[in-house]
Amino acid sequence: MIDPKKTPAQVMALSAEAHPAADDLLPAVRRTADGIRQYLIDHDIVTVPSEVRATVVETPPFMRSGTYAAMDTPGAYETKATEAYYYVTPVEKEWPAAQKEEHLRLFNKYTIDIVTVHEAYPGHYVQFLYAPKFPTKTRKMLFAYSAAEGWAHYTEQMMIEQGFGGGDPRYKLSQLSEALLRDCRYVAGIKLHTQGWTVEQATELFITKGFQERAVAKEEARRGAFDPLYLAYTLGKLQMLKLRADYQAKLGPAYSLKKFHDAYLRQGSLPISLIRRAMLGADAGPSL
């Protein structure tokens, strides 16, 4: 399925060809969401504390700049509304044909699943289902970028580790591509705001090192100009992986992946250094 003689860029370009048509983009995302949710349950990965599903809809126009997918959920203090929206940014009719194609290639068959893992199951949507259960008012109000995005980004790798994708290397490649994208964000966020980089220089980083289509790379670079802390995806994931290893060492034979995930999600979106103390004790040690 993957030709070892081809370069990474060539392999990723071939995988990106398996994408939906513009009018099938949202239906394609809807078709995958329930299956991924069921995978969590069948493989005992995390407790999903609600039967309510997120609704896949177009990203509102005012949010589309720099956003390809996002999750919008009821707040921790909401007592009536249960609606949550999984936003997917559609193709704009006025775009030139090349830009439309580049946008759709981002949503290829394999990346759609990884993005749904991140945004919905077991990423942000499952995380926010726990919000009403957070133990204090302070935890319900706080939001640490690294704890929320770190969790969602961590779940992409974790799901592949747990067999999601059935061993198809194109799913692993898609997961690694998403990780590489976040690594480029880490570099771009710092360079744009501390070392005088231009948006065009950051765009070239995403193209040459992240193997992104130019239309996607430009939006990623533009986001870095106003969101320098989007480096928190990679930072939080690394903190999550260390926390998981330390939690497993602490619990020994009593450890399970589901127990770790449930314990983490119950803490709220505190900085991971504080979540470590809640889960491991006062001598939890550094988060990295």
Image (tube, rainbow, N blue to C red):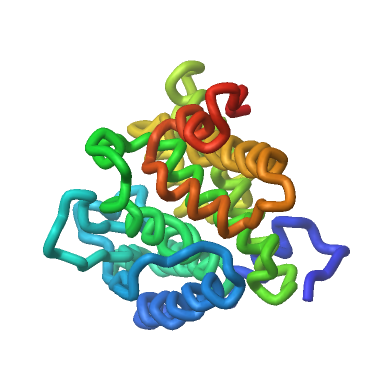
Vertical placement of 208 versus 57: above or below? above
Q: Nearer the viewer, residue 133 or 143?
A: 133
Does any portion of residue 102 appear in the rendered image?
no
Vertical placement of 241 versus 229: above or below? below
How many numbered markers are drawn?
0
Outermost right residue: 5
| Res 186 quadrant in image | top right
Screen quadrant of the N terminus: bottom right
Outermost left residue: 80
Residue 235: percent from left, percent from top: 55, 34
Outermost front residue: 254
Identify the residue at horizontal 44%, vertical 63% (top origin). 103
Residue 41: percent from left, percent from top: 52, 74
Vertical placement of 166 versus 227: above or below? below
Vertical placement of 154 versus 249: above or below? below
Identify the residue at horizontal 48%, vertical 34% (top origin). 278
Residue 74: percent from left, percent from top: 21, 57
Screen quadrant of the C terminus: top right
Identify the residue at horizontal 57%, vertical 34% (top origin). 280
| Res 111 quadrant in image | bottom right
| Res 249 quadrant in image | top right
**In-image side of 274 versus 52 (left or right):** right
**In-image side of 121 versus 162 (left or right):** left
Does any portion of residue 54 appear in the rendered image?
yes
**In-image side of 152 versus 225 (left or right):** right
Identify the residue at horizontal 17%, vertical 49% (top origin). 77
**In-image side of 198 versus 17 (left or right):** left
